[in-house]
Amino acid sequence: MDERLEKALDFSNFMVTLNNQRKLIYEKFLENSVYYERGGKFVVNKELINFCNTLLQKNQTSAIFVDDNNTPIEIDDLEEFLDKILNVYFTNVNEYLIKFNELKEKRTSEGLLNI
Amino acid sequence: MKSGVLLFAVNNSQIDYVKQAIYCAKKIKEHLNLPVALATESSSYVKDSFPFYKKYIDSIIELKKNLSTYQTRKFFDGAYTEKILLWKNHTRPDCYDISPFDETLVIDVDFIVCNNDLLNCFELNEDFLIYKDPIDIFKEREFQPFNRVSDKSINLRWATAFYFKKSKMTEAYFNLIKHIKENWSFYKLIYQIPGSLYRNDFAFSIAIHILNGFQSNDWPKVLPGNMYVSTDKDILYEIKDNKLFFVIEASPPGNFLGVTMSNSNVHVMNKFSLNRMIDIEFKNE
């Protein structure tokens, strides 16, 4: 095989492996973004965090949320709920950043699989 | 209220599902710390072949042999090796009757639990939860059979893992599945399912469709966490703690790539490679 083609195919395998591992760590990020409270399922994202913050700024201490299963869930302590979801968000986003940077630094297919 | 995990394991001539069940129970104890009941056709095989089983299995339920329900199907061990073997999957709809728990998580023995996401199913106020839309470990391929019963039919739900609470609703659901199983030639025709094999995933999906008034609906809700799927043409190459390493055939044919899954629950369809890995894991038991 032409050496130039062989090298290109090696690089192609590296790219496919890199893209796949990137997609998998993103799926893991989405999976870890889910928070369960009082029988409700909440995807912790910027929208939920902002909404909680807005309610607190309006001096609300409790609120009813419609969760991701379309079930109404009453949250008694809004401040505590916000603390918990912020913790989920930052833990998760930090983990995602670490994994993403680890992948970015790898230069071989074998390296990509060892993170 | 008593909660636990129910596993089914019925061996054929080459695949030791009991071995897989004990390994599956080991992972369940590690991540979910729940009691595990094993339903199998031969409790003596469990006791004789795996004397350490009590570390992971809390109780054994003896299933009746029913030769008339055995099927044969093709099993792959990677992309280039295939075998036709007996497939004994007829007992799954009995889970409601035989489960010793009030709240039961039923898991396929080739489903490797590597995190505690599934514990959340006991916190949700639902009678029944089941997976849909599993995630292929090789995201670049579009493996169609993952999403629908057949091209023009209903959405597929995966009986690989599901949760149920004993109630009138779930009793009716599992009784309906038994009815579908007994009248499989009719239902596979109506739901345009090719081939003749009875598959629990199909029967569960059909029963959901019927209970929803023959419409798509948001009942039942989805089990917590993701279910990742590797096909039987992928090879499980290594298990290291909660990391699974796979070798998969990418495009063009003959070109193999690696995939690593970390702290993720993975359905390993290649039973042969799973058994090989479990042999290594069980060396120190």
Image (cartoon, grey):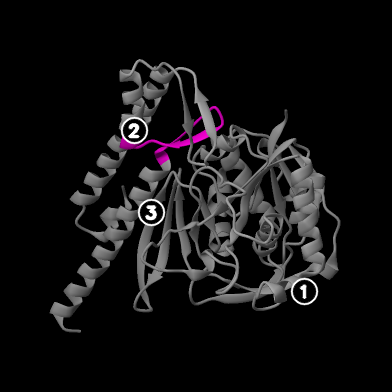
For label 1, the SS is: helix
Q: Verify CB contact (< 8 Å) between mark 3 and mark 2.
A: no
Residue range highlighted in magenta? A32-48
Q: Tell me where residue A10 appears, x and y as whole percent.
A: 22, 70
Q: Residue at x 64, y 34 (%)?
A: B34
Q: Which structural element holds mark 2?
A: helix
Which residue in the protein does label 1 denote? B186
Nearest to N terminus: mark 1 or mark 3:
1
- Residue with the mark numbered 2: A89
Element at label 3: strand
Q: Position of residue B277 (x, y in %)?
A: 52, 55
Q: Do tags 3 and 2 sit on the same chain?
A: no
* Chain for numbered disc 1: B
Above/below status of B276 relative to B254: above
Q: Nearer the viewer, residue A62 or B171?
A: A62
Res. B260 mark: 3
Of residue B134 and residue B273, the one placed in the foreground of this image is B134
The C terminus of chain B: image quadrant = top right
Q: CA distance from mark 1 to mark 2?
A: 49 Å
x then y, percent, for residue B208? 67, 56
| In magenta stretch: residue A35 | yes
Q: Is residue A52 left or right of residue B60?
A: left
Displayed quadrant of residue B77: bottom right
Look at label 1 and name its amino acid. Answer: Phe
Question: Which amino acid, by three-letter code, is at mark 3?
Answer: Thr
Residue at 42% from the left image edge and 69% from the top image edge: B142
**Contact? badges 1 and 3 (CB < 8 Å):** no
Q: Is residue B111 above or below residue B31?
A: below
